[in-house]
Amino acid sequence: MLEAALNAHGFITWSQCSEMEEFTKRLKRYFTYGRTEASHIAERISYFMRTRNEPNIRRKYLIDKLKEKKLILRSDSHLCKIFIDATEDIDVEEVVSIMELTRKQFAIHHVVWSENHLRVERILRNAVYKDGKSWNQALQIATDEIDDSVLLEYDSPVSWEDYDDDCFDRRRSWY
């Protein structure tokens, strides 16, 4: 079934994919987290395969997706670099969600990100891959998990929408 779905995308054959490390990683992730719909897997693999040597296309795609969430491509983002350079197979939705989660944490204080980012990113990914939530739902779940005591300690406003990327940049000036 997966082979037929891959072939339906026209240019990828089973033998081409099965030899690639990225393909194996993608399959393992989707099967591990219950995303076994062949057409979905084939669509994601096909995009990665088509664009993995096209960083300008991947950069533009990422920028467009970030703009939808009022985010910008950050030159200091290792995750964005991984997506653009296609050094790992990662979904654009995951990158955008983690960027938004990062902005929310830095809007409070850089220490909030330092103390929470690994935990809340794991919560985000688990909500999507294990629990089947959308990235937007997972983002809300992860945001809610930021420790209330940290929020109180830094006396942060509750409205994340008040923080644009300029504010985020100012808050990150400690780097």
Image (tube, helix red, strand yellow):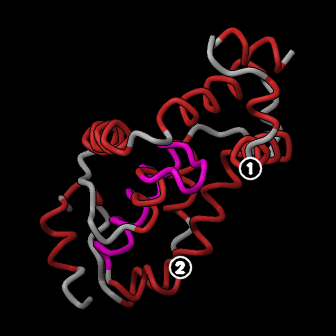
Name the residue at 42% across, 82% down. 112
Residue 116 numbered mark, or none: 2
Lateral position of residue 12 relative to residue 144, left or right = right
Is residue 71 or residue 82 the one in the foreground?
82
Name the residue at 75% across, 20% down. 13
Q: Mark 2 is on which residue type?
A: Asn
Badge 1 crowding class, 10 Å Cα cut-off, few under 14, some 14 to 19, many 20 or more, is: few
Q: Quadrant of residue 165?
A: bottom left
- The correct choice, above or below, for 100 with respect to 120 in the image is above
Residue 21 numbered mark, or none: 1
How far apart marks 1 and 2 lie (CA) works out to 31 Å
Name the residue at 28% across, 43% down. 63
| Tag 1 secondary structure | helix
- The correct choice, above or below, for 142 with respect to 29 in the image is below
| SS majority, magenta | helix
Q: Quadrant of residue 163?
A: bottom left
In percent of width and height, residue 67 lies at 25, 41
Magenta stretch bounds = 85-108
Name the residue at 65% across, 62% down. 123
**Quick one: quadrant of the C terminus?**
bottom left
Is residue 13 or residue 89 the one in the foreground?
13
| Tag 2 secondary structure | helix
Tell me which numbered mark, 1 or 2, is placed earlier along the sequence. Answer: 1
Lateral position of residue 15 relative to residue 7, left or right = right
